[in-house]
Image (tube, rainbow, N blue to C red):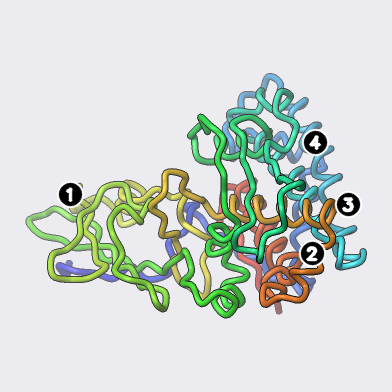
């Protein structure tokens, strides 16, 4: 075999990919698929086959899943068919119910009853920000959002986190171009390219970071997606995994052993996408969407004056994309988690 090989195609969070070809509107296509979970026998089957849940108690979990999914799909329908000015509210409540479904599918499902509330706070009494970037949301260590974070990441939030909205949007792929225009700041994500290097019957992974426009050289601690690696001397934005594997190990096994799959984003245009984040709370792809919709729904409910201020600002194109692009992206990520496979939608 050649000493160096390029891995072709995107590397995704889940080991299998499923392409759904449909003539339907993407959100309609996804909600139609998601409604399979309203069938208790299907939800039970998914719990067992994809989430390895034990049979005792699975019917009760499936019944709860079905109830949350029905409500979530009703909220999606309301968001799409109601006035756009208030669409953020039903969109967020759709997402809230779906993150509870993820909790019910996961190992921490017994904690849901004690964590039904949002687990987030937006200070409506605080003076209005000058723009979107300096707004803040607090995430508490208890509540549905924290339990959802634990469900997907396996990590528990030990204390409250104050998140600036300006630190959230760079990680939302659906509003990428609008964010760059509005702020002039680089995105929080990058594309990755992988190569397999072989020598002396051992192999390891080489990771190339394809920088977004305007970003400086990437440092090792900005790549939560990589388990253990070192920068390649003399080459910017190239890293080698430290562990060497026998050459008989497959490329798939090599990738899974070298990467933290949770930090892989949904592929875009055939590219592998991952966040660049050096903070203590890394943001897997769903979390920025949850926080952004919580914030916008809070503004719509409690501070319509600030929503008007946003409407007249350069941030409105960013905000206006969220009810369509942001909601679509979350539904895609949710259904991928439920099915434990990378779901991709394509039209005829």
Point out the tag, 4 or 1, that comes first from the N-terminus. 4
What residue did someone put label 4 on?
40
Between label 4 and label 3, give the one nearer the viewer: 3
Identify the secondary structure beneath mark 3.
helix
Q: Residues within 10 Å of mark 3 (few under 14, many from 20)?
A: some
Q: Nearer the viewer, mark 2 or mark 3?
A: 2
Q: Are marks 4 and 1 in contact (CB under 8 Å)?
A: no
Vertical relation: 64 (above or below) 216: above
> Residue 276, percent across and down?
41, 59
Q: Of 219 and 201, which appears nearest the observer?
A: 219
Q: Are marks 4 and 3 in contact (CB under 8 Å)?
A: no
Q: Which mark is residue 74?
A: 3
Residue furthest toward the right? 82
Quarter location, residue 216: bottom left
Label drawn at residue 307: 2
Q: Nearer the viewer, mark 1 or mark 3?
A: 3
Cα–Cα gap, marks 1 and 3: 50 Å
Q: Nearer the viewer, mark 2 or mark 1?
A: 2
Give the residue pinned by disc 1: 244
Circle 4 residues within 10 Å: few <14, some 14–19, many ≥20: many
Q: In screen coordinates, is 245 left or right of 133?
A: left
Report the mark closest to the observer, 4 or 1. Answer: 1
Q: Nearer the viewer, residue 103 or 29?
A: 103
Dot placed on the residue nearer the N-terminal end, 4 or 2: 4
Q: Position of residue 134 (x, y in %)?
A: 60, 59
């Amino acid at each position: 075999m050649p000493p160096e090989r390029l891995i072709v195609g995107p590397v995704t969070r889940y080991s299998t990919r499923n392409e759904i070809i449909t003539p339907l509107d993407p959100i309609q296509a996804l909600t139609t698929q998601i409604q399979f979970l309203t069938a208790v026998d299907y939800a039970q089957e998914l719990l067992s086959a994809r989430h390895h849940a034990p049979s005792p108690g699975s019917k009760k979990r499936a019944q709860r899943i079905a109830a949350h999914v029905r409500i979530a799909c009703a909220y999606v329908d309301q968001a799409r068919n109601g006035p756009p000015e208030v669409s953020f509210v039903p969109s967020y409540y759709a997402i809230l119910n779906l993150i509870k479904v993820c909790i019910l599918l996961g190992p921490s499902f017994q904690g849901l009853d004690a964590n039904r509330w949002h687990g987030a706070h937006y200070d409506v009494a605080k003076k209005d920000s000058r723009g979107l970037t300096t707004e803040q949301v607090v995430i508490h260590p208890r509540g549905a959002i924290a339990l959802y974070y634990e469900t997907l990441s396996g990590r528990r939030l030990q204390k409250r986190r104050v998140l600036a909205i300006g630190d959230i949007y760079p990680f939302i792929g659906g509003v990428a171009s609008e964010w760059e225009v509005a702020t002039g700041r680089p995105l929080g994500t990058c594309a990755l390219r992988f190569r397999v290097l072989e020598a002396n019957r051992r192999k390891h992974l080489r990771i190339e970071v394809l920088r977004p426009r305007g970003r400086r050289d990437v440092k090792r601690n900005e790549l939560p997606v990589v388990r253990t690696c070192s920068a390649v001397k003399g080459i910017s934005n190239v890293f080698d995994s430290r562990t060497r594997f026998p050459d008989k190990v497959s490329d798939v096994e090599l990738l899974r052993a070298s990467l933290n799959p949770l930090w892989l984003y949904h592929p875009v245009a055939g590219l592998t996408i991952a966040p660049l984040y050096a903070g203590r709370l890394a943001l897997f792809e769903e979390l920025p969407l949850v926080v952004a919709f919580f914030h916008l729904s809070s503004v719509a409910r409690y501070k319509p004056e600030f929503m008007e201020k946003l409407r007249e600002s350069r941030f409105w194109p960013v905000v206006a994309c969220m009810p369509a692009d942001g909601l679509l992206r979350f539904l895609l990520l949710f259904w991928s988690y439920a099915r434990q496979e990378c779901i991709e939608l394509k039209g005829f």
